[in-house]
Amino acid sequence: MKYSLIVGAALAVLASGSVLANADLAKAKNCLACHAVDNKVVGPGYKEVAKKYAGDKTAEAKLIQKVIKGGSGTWGAIPMPANPQVTEAEAKTLVKWILALK
């Protein structure tokens, strides 16, 4: 029983570290200048994005491209600018993190 508690605690720490690491990546890539996790800034909050795309099997690929190339019209009149400083691997990490938010 003690062993399973220790393993569970270790997994929780690792999982929270991953979430923190992805928030740090969002900060490092300047995503948080326009977005927040819980609320709209210039663009939608990440939890709202996760809710909108829940169950959409094409969402990850679409959003990776939107992070890199930018886009407009999905969330209103203000366009999302292109982010050429974000690699495809970084965009995938960010999008997976965003889509996993509840």
Image (spheres, rainbow, N blue to C red):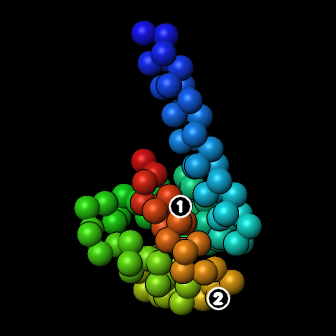
The location of residue 100, given as percent across then percent down, is 43, 54
Which secondary structure lies at badge 1?
A: loop
Amino acid marked by disc 2: Pro
Q: Residue furthest top?
A: 1
Return the residue at label 2. 84
Residue 32 position in % (x across, y down)? 67, 65
Residue at the location (55% across, 85% down)? 68
- Mark 1 sits on what residue? 45
Dot 2: element? loop
- Left or right? Give the position of 76 relative to 85: left
Rate crowding at label 1 as few (under 14), some (14 to 19) or many (20 or more) other CA atoms within 10 Å: some
Residue drawn 48% across the image and 15% down it: 3
Q: Residue at x 57, y 49 (%)?
A: 19
Image quadrant in which the N terminus is located = top left
Residue flagged by tag 1: what amino acid is it? Answer: Gly
Residue 9 visible in the picture: yes
Which one is nearer the viewer's eye here, 37 or 86? 86
Q: Which numbered disc, 1 or 2, marks the residue that appears first in the sequence?
A: 1
- Residue in the foreground of this view, choosing between 68 and 1: 1
Q: Pick whichever, 95 or 31, lies toward us.
A: 95
